[in-house]
Amino acid sequence: MNKRPLPSNASVATVGENGQLVAPAASRNVGALCDLLDQFAPLTGQALELASGTGQHIAAFAECRPGMHWQPSEVESERRASINAYTAGLPNVSKAVALDATIEGWHQPFGGRDLIVLINLLHLISWAEVETLVGEAAQALNANGRLVLYGPFMRNNRLTSAGDQRFHTALVQQDAEIGYKNDGDVSELLANHDLKILEVAEMPANNLAFIVEKSNT
């Protein structure tokens, strides 16, 4: 994925201690996301986080699901270093790997997953890239494996808050191919890949979480 021009508030992180980057959005939503995984994630198995960002999420996920083995991934080397700083000493987390989830074929080296998690990326990539990402994730999942997609979405082709309207507009002004995706379009795409929606959960800050399961056939 070529690095896209994004507004300054799209991916904010500051430098903390020991090479750890701190993203305010991750600090705010990590508790709600752990609650979501407590409800829907398998207790054991192989988990992959796409676009792991600073590493704040996966460090918390590994602690709330200690029976799973977690593989973080991230395009940017600076963020991979931050991920490794957050997860150092956690026995159920591998070193972060370079992975662009918008490129076809990544399911081959990263298959056999019982859980795949993606936080706050779909609004920052094009629809064609979303299609590739979901298709690859579907192939990377084991039968009955689960996929969690979290972030801001349109509801029925509408932006439902002033903050969402401002952010979506800023994204589109920077790159006409990106911006909020519509919940119905995402649901249809998931269904086309035999991914059954278990729940679309309302999350803090007007976000949604799609929790889906791969067919066992």
Image (tube, rainbow, N blue to C red):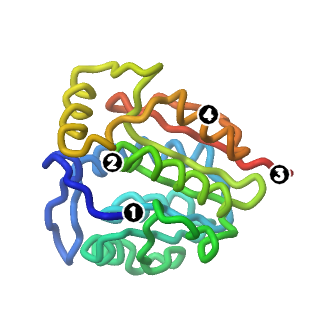
In the image: residue 165, left or right of residue 158: left
Label 1: how many residues lie within 10 Å, few (<14), some (14-19) or many (20+)?
Answer: many
In the image: residue 105, left or right of residue 121: right
Q: Are marks 4 and 3 in contact (CB under 8 Å)?
A: no
Residue at left offset 34%, top offset 19%: 160
Residue to which mark 3 is pinned: 216
Please provide percent x and percent y for residue 97: 44, 77
Please state which amino acid type lies under the numbered disc 1: Ser
Residue to which mark 4 is pinned: 188
Residue to which mark 1 is pinned: 52
Which of the image's four quarters has the N terminus? Answer: bottom left
Please state which amino acid type lies under the numbered disc 2: Leu
In primary-sequence order, the first of circles 4 and 3 is 4
Q: Secondary structure at mark 2?
A: helix
Viewer-proximal residue, 82 or 151? 151
Q: Nearer the viewer, mark 3 or mark 2?
A: 2
In the image: residue 38, left or right of residue 32: right
Please provide percent x and percent y for residue 125: 37, 50
Q: Are marks 1 and 3 in contact (CB under 8 Å)?
A: no
Rounded to the nearest angstrom, the CA distance separating label 3 from label 2 is: 31 Å
In primary-sequence order, the first of circles 3 and 2 is 2
Please state which amino acid type lies under the numbered disc 3: Asn
Residue to which mark 2 is pinned: 124
**67 relative to 115, above or below:** below
Q: Are marks 4 and 1 in contact (CB under 8 Å)?
A: no
Rounded to the nearest angstrom, the CA distance separating label 4 from label 3 is: 19 Å
Residue at left offset 50%, top offset 43%: 35
